[in-house]
Image (tube, helix red, strand yellow):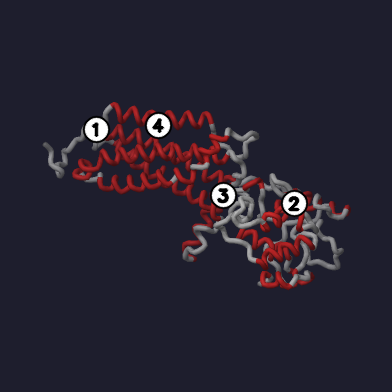
Amino acid sequence: MASPLDDDYDPDPPGALAWTASILVVLAFALGLLLYPPMSEAPKTAPADWLLLIGRFHPIILHLPVGALSLLALLELLCMTPAGRRRFEDAAALTLWVGAASAGMAVLAGILLSREGGYEGPNFILHQNMALVGTIGIMLALLLRLGAMGRPKSEMLHAYRVVFAASFGLMGLGAHFGGNMSHGSKFLTEYAPPALRAPMQNMEKWFISLVSKPKAEAAPQAAVAAQGGAPDAAAPKPAPVPAPGPKAPDSSAKPAPMPATVAKDDAKKVFEHLILPIFEAKCNKCHNEDKAKGDLRLDNYEVTMAGGESGKNIVAGKPEESLTMQRLALPLDDDEHMPPEGKEQLTAAEVALLRYWISAGASATLKVSEAQFPAEAKEAVKF
């Protein structure tokens, strides 16, 4: 009988049960992808309720492959010695099988979840595609691992380790973009050391540039004009908007988006510098370009005014008819209250500020210096 330190230790090849179980996992995953292929846009028709129910388990299931494959990485390090192979090779193969099977389940559940709608944009595309390719790689690694178990000195073992490391790394990167969807694009980098933050942000921008769609130049002007601008405001104007001279009170037909920075404090805009930061802090984790729950986005003026599947969330001059104000006024434990219970809520001053902005016409160009904020909103007017 070979000792644990015997360099010539040669384990038995995997049996028929191991091969059958592994091939079934691969075939089941392939069949699932054929029935429900990944999509980058919301489907025209929603799947059955029971499929949507399965999709809701995606955030739960995804933790299983993360744990299993992390454990596998440790077991594989131990298996690099003859003694480690003898003690842990079977455990490593079983852990890999669990990781591959649960990764396939997580991907399929994620695809079903995305078919509820409201998931799109570069972060979503990167998250979905990296998870998909990484899972395919893990399943390939499973087959390579089984093939190498009877031949510990085979080149197949080295190929398996390379495929596993690359696939697991890709899945981890895809999980990062999934975190951006759930928690905002600054979630991982916000508290990173400056020396590390810049490379991480540059890496994100590069990946996002690979899947981003070019944006039409004329769309913002058309969207703003549709909000009720003056007839002569339909003519194209250059952006960014030059320093303003005398303006008519209703300037909502000006082209948006606004400039990223403003030279003088008296040129600050109520929406850009007061309302939008509230949305970014309290709303945009669920209502952004990548994750537009209810088809509602609040990350720029045009999409804010466009509303979502439930109708107009902002009705200029009528806060009582604006869905946003209605949802804010609901009891905290009401399912329709926004933000949902457990999320950071708007302060009373922020609600008052939002109500004033809507009452004043919900303009994209109303200046802070021209606004007459009510006393209860002034706590939220800070620079």
Kind of residue indicated by mark 3 = Ile
Residue 32, label in figure: none
2 or 3: mark nearer the eye: 2
| Badge 3 or badge 1: first in the primary sequence | 1
Residue type, mark 2 in image = Pro
Q: Give the quadrant of the N terminus.
A: top left
Q: CA distance from mark 4 to mark 3?
A: 32 Å
Number of numbered discs visible in the structure rendering: 4
Give the alpha-carbon distance from disc 1 to disc 4, as whole Å: 21 Å
Badge 1 crowding class, 10 Å Cα cut-off, few under 14, some 14 to 19, many 20 or more, is some
Q: Which residue is mark 2?
A: 220
Label 1, on which residue? 150
The residue that appears at 36% across and 39% down in the rendered structure is 98
Query: Could you say which disc has been placed on residue 208 in the image?
Result: 3
N-terminal of the pair, mark 4 or mark 3, is: 4
Q: Quadrant of residue 99?
A: top left
